Image (spheres, rainbow, N blue to C red):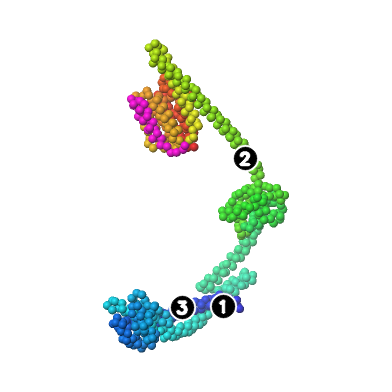
Amino acid sequence: MTSGIRLFLFGSLRRQLIVGVAAVHAVMMTLFIADIAQKQKAAFLDYQLRQAIALVSNLATSSVNGTASHDIMGLQELVDAQTVYQELKFAIVTDVNGLVLAHTDHARVGQHLLDMPTDPIQKIISNSLTLVDVATPVLLMRHHVGWIRIGIAQTGVKQKLNDISRKGLLFTLVTILTGSLLAWVMGRQFTKRLYVINSVMKEVQAGNTAVRSEVSGSDEAADLSAGFNSMLDKLAQQIVERTAAIKDLRESEEKYRLLFDSAGDAIFIHDTDGRFLEVNSLACERLGYSHAELMSLPLSKLDTPEQCQYVQDRVVRLMEQGHHMFETVHQRKDGSTVPTEVSARKINWDGQLAMMNICRDISKWKLAEEEIRQLNNKLEQRVIERTAQLEIAYQEMESFAYSVSHDLRGPLRSIDGFSLALLEDCGDKLDDDGKNYLRRVRTATQRMAQLIDDILKLSRVTRVNMASETVNLSTMAVSIAEELRRTDQQRKVEFVIKDDVLAKGDPRLLMLVLDNLLGNAWKFTYGRAEARIEFGISNLDGKTAYFVRDDGAGFDMKYMDKLFTAFQRLHTELEFPGTGIGLTLVQHIIHRHGGTVWAEGAVDQGATFWFTLGNK
């Protein structure tokens, strides 16, 4: 029944146009008339409200003295006089506490009203279709002395509003019928030419593609007819082109199938539910299934039971990222396994979302990885063994250094002490050669003691635990320079130290580096009347390099390989005293910081010692 009515009303464009125009007209007229009726209702209600407000205001003005003096009889006369208004429902006079002084219902005089306003201002208590209830304060010299309350029934107004609604409904029905008739006439006129085009379309659907529409003119129907004829012409051309395209597509599919089956990797194409849409011949050959058997399997059956738990997660990630690479283990029909690298990608397959998995056999890679892993294990074991050997060697070296320090210091102190005692106690019995021999013995023992101290210091530097923190090398250099000046205040040496040179490393070890380099610069500029020693920073090939430069004795570059070798010296003890350990110590410290150290110089033209810190 419902479908029959729908077909009758909307079965054709003409009927849709007629029903649509009629419906729009009906809705517009209904809204228009409803708006007018609503405005008239509002006007009537507003009139009644204003009448109630005027009545209550007049009564409040007339009852000021009576309310203030509680003249109940006078107030009752005023209230009774209001009954001349036919729609008056009640009139009440109360004091400020709500005690009824006068009422149209005499029986309620002396009662209290509990719903009176609290603030002395006029208040509309009710404004509905049944009652208008207004209360206003009675004021004597701006002093609140009571209340006046008026209630007016809306019986007459309600009757008038019902009349307005009935007339509006009648007028609406008349306008709807008129509009529907006009819509029917317009609909038939507007769709007449469209029906002609529709008849041509039906012939085309029946197979007669040679028929054409003959509607002419300058309106939209004529444009539609011309467009329809043009479409038929293009359709005929497309039929020819489509026939040729189908032929080309068939040839392309044959080429694709050849490439698909000739691929060097197994290819699986499946939908989002894990059902295979296509597999190539290598996939069947590698897993030992026929094409039909493999197509009937779910995606999860390709992997070993251990790998199946990851299948859904891999599909989810592929859907999110569009491409995903992972390793898995496929299981053949006979139960054997194939380590596989999978490159998965989302594709469109015959209009539906699908995934293409290109699977490469990585069995040889896995064998090679296992061999590498075993070699690494062996190498790690060798490193552990060598490390243990080095630890033992370091411990033995420490023990040796301690023994040398402990066993040799005593005899050296005895030799130095007895030599000094001979010079002091028996000096008058020795000639100059004897005294010179004793002095040389003391110098040799003191040098031997210094050499032992330097060896111990080198041993400690090799083993000490390193800290890593930001160090101000400039502050260290200034401190060392001041200490050097105090050792020989007669020398004229200019120290040029760049401000705020920062580095990251062990503060104690870096202090030793600067102490040795600046101490060497101080020592090898001894022969200069005025010397210059500089500490600074530079950028060499993108790396931060620090330097100590002097204008002292310098050195021959062909002997540079001896500079950092222990006990190798380029100058005699008489020229410049020393043990040949200082620069070796510097090199050990710099290497422990992951840096390098080198020198540049020329004889009698000074030297520059550079170092970098790798911040290990």
First in sequence: mark 2 vs mark 1? 1
Residue 399 drawn at (x, y percent): 52, 27
For disc 2, the neighbor class at 10 Å (few under 14, some 14 to 19, many from 20) is: few
Q: Quadrant of residue 577?
A: top left
- 13 left or right of 64? right
Which of discs 2 and 3 lies nearer the camera? The answer is 2
What mark, if any, has residue 241 been given in the picture? none
- Label 2, on which residue? 373
Between circles 2 and 1, the one closer to the viewer is 2
Residue visible at 62% across and 72% down? 203
Q: Name the residue under label 1.
A: 9
Q: Where is residue 338 in the image (x, y as percent from the top left)?
A: 67, 47
CA gap, disc 2 and disc 3: 86 Å
Disc 1 marks a residue whose amino acid type is: Leu
The Cα atoms of the two marked residues, 2 and 1, are separated by 82 Å
Q: Residue at x 38, y 32 (%)?
A: 479
Circle 1 — which element?
A: helix
Q: Quadrant of the N terminus?
A: bottom right
Residue 160, position as x, y percentages in the image: 42, 85
* 129 is higher (above) or lower (below) than 336: below
Please, what secondary structure does the residue beneath circle 3 have?
helix
Residue 463 visible, this orientation: yes
Q: What's drawn in magenta, residue-wise? A: 467-495
Q: Please name the residue that numbered disc 3 is placed on.
A: 31
Q: Earlier along the polypeptide chain: callout 1 or callout 3?
A: 1
Mark closer to the observer (1, 3): 3
Disc 1 residue crowd, few under 14, some 14–19, many 20+, Cα 10 Å: some
Sort mark 3 into few (<14), some (14-19) or many (20+) by Cα contacts within 10 Å: few
Closer-to-camera residue (154/119): 119
In magenta stretch: residue 330: no
* 400 to 273, vertically: above or below: above
Relative to the observer, which residue lies in front, 608 or 501? 501
